[in-house]
Amino acid sequence: MALEDNFRKVTPYVPGEQPKIPNLIKLNTNENPYPPAPGVRDALLKLAEDPSVLRKYPAPDCEILEEAIADYYGISRDRLFVGVGSDDVLSMAFLTFFNSKKPVLFPDITYSFYDVWAEVYGIPYKQIPLDENFEIRAEDYRMENGGIVIANPNAPTGVAKPKAWMEDFLKEHTDTVVIVDEAYVDFGAESVIDLIDKYENLLVVQTFSKSRSMAGMRIGMAFGSKLLIKYLKDVKFSVNSYTMNTTSLLLGVEAIRDDAYFREKVQAVIATRERVKLQLKSLGFVFRDSKTNFIFASHPAMDASEIMKKLRERGIIVRHFSKPRIDQYLRISIGTDAEMDELIKALAEILHR
Ligand SMILES: *Cc1c(COP(=O)(O)O)cnc(C)c1O
């Protein structure tokens, strides 16, 4: 018998690369091009002056951060869960709520971590094809299931469903947990947070990584009924009591408090995105409308991996997925105006326009 015969074997999720190339224009992981709120810097400086607080374990109940988030969204703390990025929150939610022999349903083209978590936890799942316009068809989900996961807006397509559609969908699925992953919702889509009182089985997941410029800090959260949050917290405390470190708790509070800064930067990303849409269109790119901080685009005259390669030679990186149905698309994150000008210039050169 070989040592690894009884090991758990999984094919891991592959995150976008973080290369150490100087002056790189990095448009491959949907990071926010703007720094976190100024209060985050002040809180870091304060911590640097007196780091003795790091001697102690962090608050296992994440009190200060939960209070700040609960206050911002006007909900009680017993309907809120925070974790180490929404990846941690989603992973805990899969472990907690998907414990059935029936398959968990999610689209074939969506965040590619969902099937990885299903595999690592041994959860049966079924990927439901999006239609040819990358739209979810509600009728395809009408089957017995162990739960449903919908990213809204979806990634990497950028396509968003309106709130009314989401509510109709929720009305059809009240027997199992429906997770709505709203990682990009702040960039112009509609949240279903205010439906958590109406649908006890709804878990809404959001993150500080994109709209709040804190991907490096790892803060994510879930909103749901008291019932869901209780079970989620029970599982978290059965795995690791101290998921959130003291620095994340302190800096997260500052990031959520500064609403004016948040709105200003989200608006800046949206304005850049809308301009870039027009420029990509005039270069001949085709894409579904995006309500996120990225555009998922294809060019009828040039192979996507070829475009990606040529952009890279010019110091610009974007994301490409070598997967059926989407291998002719590039996912281009929205950077600063200056970065996007460089991108458009490079694309015009590559396409000889
Ligand atoms: C970025 C992303 C996440 C994970 O974000 P965290 O950095 O872990 O908070 C989750 N879901 C989707 C769809 C994403 O794009």
Image: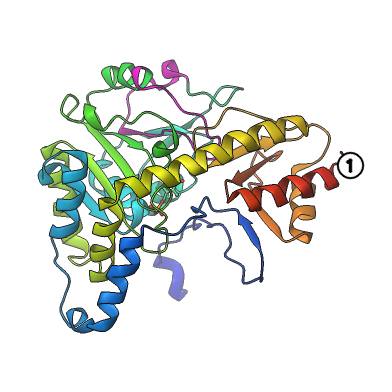
185 above or below 4?
Answer: above
Q: Position of residue 33 (x, y in %)?
A: 52, 54
Residue in the image at 66% along x and 70% along y = 21
17 above or below 186?
Answer: below
In the rendered image, the quadrant that contains the C terminus is top right
Mark 1, Cα crowd under 10 Å, few <14 / some 14-19 / many 20+, is: few
Q: Position of residue 70 (x, y in %)?
A: 17, 45
Q: Amino acid at mark 1?
A: His
Residue in the image at 52% along x and 23% along y = 135
Q: Nearer the viewer, residue 281 or 137?
A: 281
In the visual, does 311 lie left or right of 196? right
313 above or below 124?
Answer: below
Colour logic: rainbow
Q: Is residue 131 visible?
A: yes
Q: Position of residue 147 (x, y in %)?
A: 31, 33
What secondary structure do most residues of the magenta stretch adopt? loop
Q: Which residues are magenta?
A: 137-164
Mark 1 falls on what kind of element? loop
**Residue located beneath label 1 in the image:** 352
Q: Is residue 154 magenta?
A: yes
Q: Nearer the viewer, residue 41 or 296?
A: 41
Query: Image quadrant of residue 167?
Result: top left
